[in-house]
């Protein structure tokens, strides 16, 4: 069976940046499982996997605009240290919960001094060229129950 909409797909993958640095991979021999056609993965990756069959290898290159976007300067902010009253041990790279102009989001501390903390609300992979390499482990037609409930957090059975 080939990958198409409404198929449950299992893939083994490694994700690297354009310098070849490993960013992510399927864990402990367990494949990533998703429902093709519901935007559960990056659309550009989903498009690159379309038509593949179990046992086939893939390599999909994704530019920032088709991945996690380009960094947005407005999501980088310098805030007073007093905005973190319950976090005395702040460190660069630490994730903190905060609010942008429109929503709650995760921020990463990228700089700090005695008076302020600079946080970045961009996705950590924003601005990166990405390469997904791997193989298709399994493809099967989704059940009616999976099609109805997948977006509610249901996993493949």
Image (cartoon, rainbow, N blue to C red):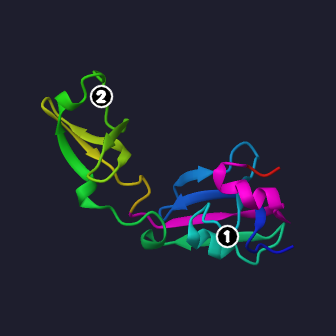
Magenta span includes 151: yes
Figure check: 123 above or below 117 = below
Residue 85: x and y, percent? 24, 23
Nearer to us in this view, 9 or 63: 9
Mark 2 lies on a secondary structure that is loop
Residue 10 in sight: no
> Residue, x 55% and y 53% (percent of image)?
22
Q: Which residue is under mark 1? A: 37
Density class for disc 2 (Cα within 10 Å; few <14, some 14-19, many ≥20) is: some
Magenta span includes 11: no
* Label 2 – label 1 distance at C-alpha: 41 Å
Nearer to us in this view, 20 or 56: 56
Q: Which residue is under mark 2? A: 90
Please give the range of residues in magenta: 127-154
Using residue 55 as the reference point, say whether residue 130 is left or right of it: left
Figure check: 154 above or below 113 = below
> Residue, x 83% and y 49% (percent of image)?
157
> Residue, x 77% and y 74% (percent of image)?
52
Using residue 152 as the reference point, say whether residue 109 is left or right of it: left
């Amino acid at each position: 069976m080939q990958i198409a909409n409404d198929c449950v797909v299992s893939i083994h993958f490694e994700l690297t940046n354009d310098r070849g640095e490993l960013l992510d991979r399927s864990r402990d021999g367990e494949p990533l499982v998703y429902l093709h056609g519901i935007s559960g993965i990056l659309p550009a990756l989903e498009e690159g996997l379309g038509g593949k069959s179990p046992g086939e290898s893939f390599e999909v290159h994704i530019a920032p605009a088709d991945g996690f976007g380009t960094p947005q300067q407005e999501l980088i902010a310098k805030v007073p240290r007093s905005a973190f009253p319950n976090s005395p041990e702040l460190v660069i790279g630490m994730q903190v919960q905060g609010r942008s102009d429109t929503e709650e989001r995760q921020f990463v501390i990228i700089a700090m001094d005695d008076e302020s903390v600079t946080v970045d609300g961009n996705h950590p992979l924003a601005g990166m060229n990405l390469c997904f390499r791997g193989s298709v482990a399994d493809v099967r037609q989704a059940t009616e129950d999976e099609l109805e409930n997948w977006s509610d957090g249901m996993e493949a059975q």
